[in-house]
Image (cartoon, rainbow, N blue to C red):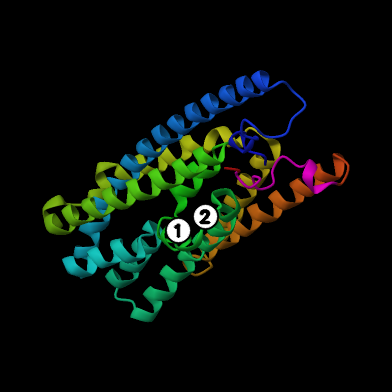
């Protein structure tokens, strides 16, 4: 997708008068700045709702038998809520370490799929990609891919990823130190708050019929596999279904537009000029 901040800068070759080119570029820049600010607001709201849920992980991890240092290591290094909860769930139930690692690993594979989607959108250089990998989670991917301009994509990704990382780890420490004094933190409804924020972010994107079909199919596959498949597999299967439906829809619309890949509006953004 050609992003609004990918337009030629003033001075680029054009048939339009220089003054008109400057006015158009200025208007586009203002529009992009507005979108960046909106992306930051989304990122902050999602970060707060999700980060606060870290207190639940910290408390449950200590109850499952991990100490504070081990709990913090999981949040700092693994930094994937679903995988972290899966791991302590197996540990708390008395499962073998290999089973806990395998379950967490299955859930963590989805982040690799996110990375493949975010790569062309963020267009990061060298070591920035290594840093970005740590912050590639459900929420940062959702906020980033919901934006239209590359600058807004980057702002949404970094503000969400870093914001959640800081709050999640801070709240993990609070939960781990409080331990049993918190009771069952799930009774506070923080898990519902995080899920609600995530759903509110994704809801506008379900307006298209293809998105509705992909979401419905993914949910159905996950529900059918949960009772019979190992932890993490339903998530990966649901993601695979959504990807297949999305690719089929893109190819269908490309064919309808004349078969040219450049005619699709869903491709990666063009490289941002400087």
Residue 124 circle label: 2
Q: Quadrant of the N terminus?
A: top right
- What distance separates the C-alpha of mark 1 from that of mark 2? 6 Å
Front one among 69 and 4: 4
In the visual, does 103 lie left or right of 65?
Answer: right
- What residue appears at the point 61 percent right and 34 percent down from the top-left corner? 9
- The quadrant the C terminus occupies is top right
Task: Say if the magenta span includes residue 271.
Answer: yes
Rendered residue at 49%/49% (across/down) = 141
Q: Quadrant of residue 37?
A: top left
Q: Is residue 81 above or below residue 29?
A: below
Residue denoted by label 1 = 128
Q: Is residue 233 left or right of residue 11?
A: left
SS label for mark 1 = helix
Magenta stretch encompasses residue 101: no
Q: Secondary structure at mark 2?
A: loop
């Amino acid at each position: 997708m050609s992003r609004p901040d990918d337009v030629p800068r003033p001075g680029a070759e054009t048939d339009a008068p220089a003054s008109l080119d400057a006015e158009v570029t200025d208007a586009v820049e203002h529009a992009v700045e507005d979108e960046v600010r909106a992306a930051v607001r989304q990122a902050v709201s999602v970060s707060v709702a999700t980060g606060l849920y870290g207190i639940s992980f910290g408390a449950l991890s200590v109850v499952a038998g991990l100490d504070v240092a081990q709990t913090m290591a999981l949040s700092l290094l693994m930094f994937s809520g679903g995988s972290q909860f899966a791991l302590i769930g197996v540990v708390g139930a008395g499962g073998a370490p290999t089973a806990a690692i395998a379950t967490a690993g299955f859930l963590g594979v989805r982040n690799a799929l996110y990375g493949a989607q975010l790569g062309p959108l963020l267009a990061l250089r060298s070591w920035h990609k290594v840093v970005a990998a740590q912050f590639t989670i459900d929420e940062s991917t959702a906020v980033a891919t919901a934006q239209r301009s590359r600058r807004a994509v980057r702002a949404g990704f970094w503000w969400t990823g870093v914001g959640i990382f800081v709050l999640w780890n801070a709240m993990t420490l609070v939960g781990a130190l409080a331990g049993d004094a918190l009771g069952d933190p799930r009774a506070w409804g923080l898990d519902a708050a995080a899920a609600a924020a995530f759903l509110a972010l994704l809801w506008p994107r379900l307006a298209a019929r293809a998105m509705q079909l992909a979401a419905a199919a993914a949910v159905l596959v996950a529900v059918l596999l949960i009772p019979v498949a190992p932890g993490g597999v339903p998530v990966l299967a649901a993601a695979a279904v959504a990807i297949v439906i999305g690719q089929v829809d893109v190819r269908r619309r490309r064919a309808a537009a004349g078969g040219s890949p450049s005619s699709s509006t869903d491709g990666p953004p063009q490289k941002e000029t400087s």
